[in-house]
Amino acid sequence: FENVVPSDPNVCAMQQIKGTDKKYFTNCKQWYHRKICSQPTVITYECCPGYEKIPGEKGCPAALPLVNIYNTLGVVGATTTKMYSERAQLKEEIEGPGSFTFFAPSNEAWAALPTEILDALVSNVNIELLNALHYHMVNRRLTSEELKHGSSFASMYQDSHVHIHHYSNGIITVNCARLIKPDQHATNGIVHVVDRVITAISNDMQAIIDIDDDLETLRTAFAAAGLTSILENEGQYTVFAPTNEAFEKIPAETLNRILGDPVALRDLLNYHILKNMQCAESIVSGTPMETLQGTVLEVGCDGNQMTLNGKAIITKKDQLGTNGVIHYINELLIPDSAKTLLELAEGSSVAMATKLFVEAGLTTHLTGSEALTMLAPLDEAFKDGVQKLMTNHIVKEQMSSKSLYHGQELETLGGLKLRVFVYRNNLCIENACIAAHDKTGRYASMFTVDKVLTPPMGTVMDVLKADDRFSLLVGAIQTAGMTELLNQQGTLTFFAPTNDAFNALGQAELNKLMRNPGELSGVLRYHLGEGMLVSGGVGSHTRLKPLQGEKLELGRNYTVYVNKVPVAHADLMATNGVVHAVSSVIKPLRESQQAHPHCLQTELISQHRTEASC
């Protein structure tokens, strides 16, 4: 379409999938993606319905004279429908007086019909073909704008209704056939070209499932769960119907457990039902859609395949019932709410943790019906295959991370109490912070965390004494008379200088410091912050008040920094605080080095007070 711009008169933009004849009327909103079902598209311009070009003039200024519906079928290229209209002796009716809407199948739509069906329609001298065409007609003029979502209209075949869906992405379907050329006006009505031949619908979804042997297991499952009424009720649902083959792919043990548990079975089946009716042609990109179970399924497409959660598992599309549409699938979808802890873990990126839980002999807890919460570290959290006590990664009740609060204590299967810390940017249990959304199973839940839990083995003083890197620091603490402070109850964050940090001062300065307990105490107290701050609680600018001195400026860039000094080893947990090893003695920052001193935002978390600059 040379020299045509969209602003010219009567020019319509079309989005066409590259390498196919598939076109979509479009608007700027949708061009933006330049993709339909992951396939690249090209934008083409053509004359809007009813207009044509005049050489030398802009756009499509010439309005074509309106002709009757019979001749309009020829104008819009629906020549097969035109030919069959003549053969079925419908020609006279659609040339004559009246006001009709004709959903005219494209030539490709007729060609796609199975041969035996087409033969049966066309070869008979009887009335089948006329009935079929009359079902594509409504006895009044309906523009695409009047085809409202969820509406239905009596057709001219025994008043059988045709069902309209007008989706928010602009796509309009009639009995799930897409309108590919809408609003072609005629003297006696209007023609909408559709992409398939439609047939009358008489059964509800339950009846469709009842008569199909491929859905025998599903039929039994719906009956066992007491859900058959949903499939018989009024409504506009979408059912993703797992075939017998889909059920056979599931391990027998898992399947029998779910089939024998009405709550899990109901959740499983409801997870296959969408609240709204989605014809296959209405999907042009991945969209999260709500199920009756309450969570969402990602319904999408890839080329001409419809997909669920990114997988092309749909084997048969658009089986229409009076109360919705059924798409057959060859894989069962199991929602988290029907899974055991072990199944939740197997479906997540925590393979190493799963293996260690099993090796620790905890399988009965992971597959049983106890109310528990598993804290599962990500695979990358296991450095050098460190194996920690896995019993302390399972909490004795089923929790939601949304209900955790600062200072809460959680009891583990191993009998340990774990502390909860709530920060502005994170939620942590001891040193491990939540790294993904909760997974809520049938009886138990799983939190994915970013580190292996290292519960405290003693006080801050005990932690320092047990680690050779801090031998000089332990001596300094005793000299400064601070042993009691680091052993008593409380919540402290200690940026603990290692032996390397003290040695870096030089022998002379170190000796001078050690001879002056008052000065030494001041230096050490500047390294001690009020409140528990694990590394996961440090944002890009976090402030901590030291026991002595102005403030400590914390930041993070892959690692945590305190006054520009990197933390060498974070999160050594203690009963009364947390220790972070630093390889340099921390000095107060000069004003010029401080982060935005003019712009402070105070953050109060429980009794723990840190200040974060904005």
Image (cartoon, helix red, strand yellow):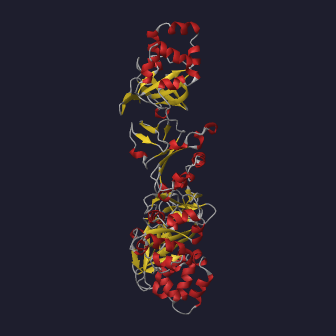
Closest to the observer, 144 or 98: 144
Q: Is residue 54 visible?
A: no
Q: Nearer the viewer, residue 389 or 524?
A: 389
Q: Residue 395 location in percent, x, y?
A: 46, 45
Using the rendered image of the protein, determine whether residue 343 is visible from the camera's viewpoint. yes
Q: Is residue 159 left or right of residue 512?
A: left
In the rendered view of the protein, which quadrant contains the N terminus? bottom right
Find the residue positioned furthest to the bottom. 125
Measuring 51% from the left and 72% from the top, which residue is drawn there? Answer: 218
Question: Of 20 and 238, which appears nearest the observer?
Answer: 238
- Nearest the eye: 159 or 322: 322
In this rendering, position of residue 407 left or right of residue 320: left
Residue found 43% across the figure and 30% down from its top: 532
- Residue 504 is situated, as x and y percent measured from the top left of the image, at 58, 14
- From the viewer's perspective, is residue 166 above or below residue 550? below
* Position of residue 59 measured from the top left corner of the image (x, y, whole percent): 51, 61
Residue 51 versus residue 200 in the image, above or below: above
